[in-house]
Image (tube, helix red, strand yellow):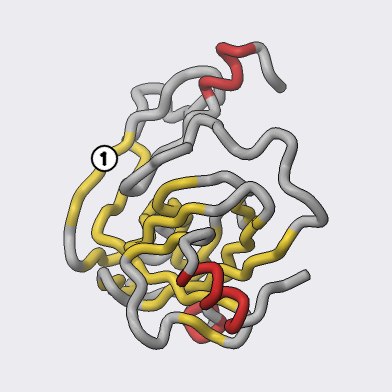
Amino acid sequence: MILSDCTIQTLLENGTLRISPLGQGQIQPASVDIRLGDTFSVVEDTSSGIVTLEKEISYKTIRSESYLLLPNQFVLATTMEYVELPDYLTAFVEGRSSLGRMGLFIQNAGWVDPGFRGEITLELYNANRCAIELKAGRRVGQLVFAQMDQAALHPYRGKYQGQTGATGSRVFLDAEAGEC
């Protein structure tokens, strides 16, 4: 079940759901707007020109109020908002249609697990032929919340728990643990 603005507001007021900072007007009929933070990360070039899943990836990270995303460029960014989900709520990250129509693709894995705490890292890609200026504080997407039929038996406690800033891939940790 997708949560309504009324339910979202109630959960925020009683502290079950936490989103900070949360400005006036961010709560929409069935979502909460998320804004672009001020941290951006790009994958650093490797001497081989190859990024593997088994080794830690190096990123160049900057803090800035604006970032010029060049055509066909990919950058990690973060939300301004720090989110804490209870063990029975999940959230979907959706980009804004008006930005997608400019050629700005806003992704993340698209899913926020129950029990997650942290800023959400976004993957941004410019599919346009022109550069796109990104500014911290700008609405870039929304969180759509869904209530699970019961609390998760194993809520999220993974490698991105508590993340702040544009957090790079930690997929290499899966290889170390022997996971697929």
Residue identified by numbered label 1: 60
Q: Residue at x 57, y 77 (%)?
A: 31
Q: Secondary structure at mark 1?
A: strand
Left or right side of 114 for 74: left
Q: Position of residue 2 (x, y in %)?
A: 72, 72
| Amino acid identity at mark 1 | Lys
> 51 or 66: nearer the eye?
66
Residue reaching furthest front?
A: 14
> Vertical placement of 52 versus 41: above or below?
above
Which residue is at 52% across, 22% downward? Answer: 172
Count of numbered circles in the view: 1
Quarter that holds the C terminus: top right
Is 116 located above or below residue 120 in the figure? above
Binning the other alpha carbons within 10 Å of mark 1 as few (below 14), some (14 to 19) or many (20 upward) gives: few
Q: Position of residue 107 (x, y in %)?
A: 55, 60
Determine the residue located farthest toward the left in the rendered image.
64
In the rendering, at what x and y percent does residue 82 appear? 38, 56
- Residue 160 can be seen, yes or no: yes
Q: If the image is split into quadrants, where does the N terminus sit? A: bottom right
Residue 94, located in which quarter of the rendered image?
bottom right
The answer to whether residue 103 of the structure is visible from this angle is no
Residue closest to the eye, 97 or 33: 33
Residue furthest right in the image:
149
Q: Is residue 107 above or below residue 135?
A: above
User: Which residue is at 47% across, 76% downward?
Assistant: 33
Of residue 164 and residue 36, the one placed in the foreground of this image is 164
Q: Residue at x 64, y 39 (%)?
A: 155
